[in-house]
Amino acid sequence: MRSLAYAGLVVAGVCTFVGPSAAGAQVGPVVDAEWLARRMGDPHVVLLHADMRRTSYDEGHIPGARFLDLNRIVWDGDPAWGTEMRSSEEIGGTLRQLGLHDAIEHVVVYGTNPLFASRTFLTLEVMGLAGRVHVLDGGQAAWVSSGRELTSVEPEFPRAGVLTLSPRDDVLVSADWVHNRLGEEAIALVDARPDDEYTGEDGGLGGRANPGHIPGAHQMYWEELIDSRASPYLRHRADLVDLFEKAGVSDGDTVVAYCMVGWRASYTYLAARMLGYDTKFYDGSWRDWGTREDLPAVTGAEPGASR
């Protein structure tokens, strides 16, 4: 897994994200279309349309949104495997090119795919923007369903300014970190994959990895957290709490989210953060764990180890 350079980083002229909103009202990880509409045109609010390809942005985006090419913040690991976080230097450079600077109070992220927004949210929190990065609930579909229009016009924005990043070392965890804590009562492993991947019925993605899941991990497929793909709103808070409890999470636990390559678990991370859990993210996920012969795996529908 590629590592982030955490301590004492100053990104090439891009220098800890310290915005003036620290003294203002606290805004949670998720905001709605009404919240965003009231702040349209506010120079301290930046809106990012996140996608792997620019096509959806060009076809129509929320007015004022800047296009974030996700390829600039994630990288492809081994061929055909997928996603891990790029270096702090690369991510910092991308954010600066998007016009982010220290006076920005809120960065609102959305996408046509809810996982694009949650993966960006995770990345920007790791970069030190916790409290200032938010996901638009329901994404672009929510904006349209609220009666508001899209545009194909790309906004102009200044790219000069100082952006100070303080990358965190307390969010991303490694396989060894997880392995050393298997069985600990306060560590709640949550697997965001569907049934066949969790149980191992998929054969470990056709033999490319060992089948199954991390011992003690409870399954909570990420799509359970939203109403539906067509209506990608987060479910009501009480429903989310119930889902996490059924996934073995108790008050005071540290949630550790993982999936296959780090996309689906990013939504688990977002929901857990919204509920206030101490949350970690195993970016390597099963692509990392399931290809190592020195790490245990469990097949079947049960977690396989008591907490």
Image: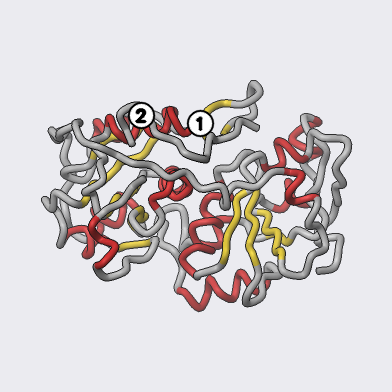
Between 63 and 166, which is closer to the camera in this rendering? 166
Give the camera-side residue of 74 and 51: 74
Q: Which is nearer the eye, 208 or 276?
A: 276
Say whether disc 1 or disc 2 marks the residue closer to the N-terminus: 1
Residue 71 visible at all: yes
Displayed quadrant of residue 78: top right
10 Å neighbourhood of mark 1: few (<14), some, or many (≥20)? some
Contact (CB < 8 A) between labels 1 and 2?
Answer: no
Q: Where is residue 127 shown, x and y percent of the image?
A: 44, 44
Badge 1 amino acid: Arg
At 33% from the left and 47% from the top, the residue drawn is 17
Please give the name of the residue rendered at 53% of the width and 28% of the height, measured from the top-left corner: 75
Answer whether residue 108 is visible to the viewer in this image.
no
Which residue is at a point 35% across and 30% down the rendered structure image?
94
Q: Which mark is residue 86?
A: 1
**Residue 107, label in figure:** none
Q: Residue at x 69, y 43 (%)?
A: 174
Q: Which residue carries the number 2 mark?
A: 93
Kind of residue at badge 2: Gly
